[in-house]
Amino acid sequence: MFVAEKGIDIEIVEASDPGNPAELSDAFCERHPHRRVPILELDDGDWIGEAAAICRYLETIYPDNLFMGRNAKEAARVEMWDRLAEWEGLMAVSEVFRNTHRLFVDPVLSAWLQARTAVERLVSSVAARERGAVGQSGYRDTH
């Protein structure tokens, strides 16, 4: 959206595997082992990852029609609202998706939930013992 709104003519290359659009292509993963999109590949072969960093770079290279602020105060306010939207909006949506979508219900998640329950029981037991609520031989509540 940023590229389109700025009116920048940039080649967009699909990173997904043509045979399996849900997966990144092997060629992309070989060049970018951190396996995240988007990536902006520069003419010198270097690259920039992360959408916000790409937008900041393009804003500097194409200073017409500024979106990220014309001065320090505007730039700081744009950054503030971007962070708020990310943490209070996108993160909440991603948590709902991660905790409700069928693709994420698997043995790893189930094992994690079982481990979390076991840790919660242990913490509860230790807390009860510290309060003297658990009857143990020789233990006396000194609080």
Image (cartoon, grey):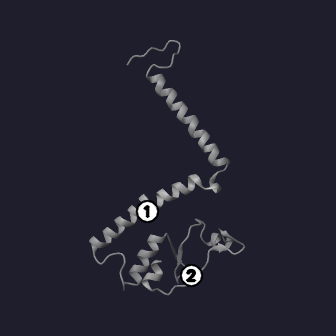
Picture quarter with the C terminus: top left
Q: Position of residue 88 (x, y in %)?
A: 42, 58
Q: Quadrant of residue 12?
A: bottom right
Q: Position of residue 103 (x, y in %)?
A: 65, 56
What residue lies at 62% left-to-right and 54% top-to-bottom? 104
Q: Position of residue 132 (x, y in %)?
A: 45, 19
In screen coordinates, is 11 left or right of 76? right
The first of marks 1 and 2 along the sequence is 2
In the depicted view, which residue is nearer to us: 117 or 140?
Answer: 117
Kind of residue at badge 1:
Glu
Badge 2 local density, few (<14 within 10 Å), some, or many (20+)? Answer: few
What residue lies at 32% left-to-right and 76% top-to-bottom? 69
- Secondary structure under tag 2 reads loop
Residue reaching furthest to the right: 19
In screen coordinates, is 129 left or right of 60? right
Q: Which mark is residue 86?
A: 1
113 to 95, vertically: above or below: above
Cα distance in 3D space between marks 1 and 2: 24 Å
Q: Nearer the viewer, mark 1 or mark 2?
A: 1
Q: Position of residue 96 (x, y in %)?
A: 53, 55
What residue lies at 62% left-to-right and 72% top-to-bottom? 31
Badge 1 local density, few (<14 within 10 Å), some, or many (20+)? Answer: few
- Secondary structure under tag 1 reads helix
Q: Quadrant of residue 118?
A: top right
Q: Quadrant of residue 74?
A: bottom left
In the depicted view, which residue is nearer to us: 76 or 86?
Answer: 86
112 to 63, vertically: above or below: above
Query: Tags 1 and 2 in contact by the CB under 8 Å rule?
Result: no
What residue lies at 39% left-to-right and 66% top-to-bottom? 82
Kind of residue at badge 2:
Ile
Q: Which mark is residue 12?
A: 2
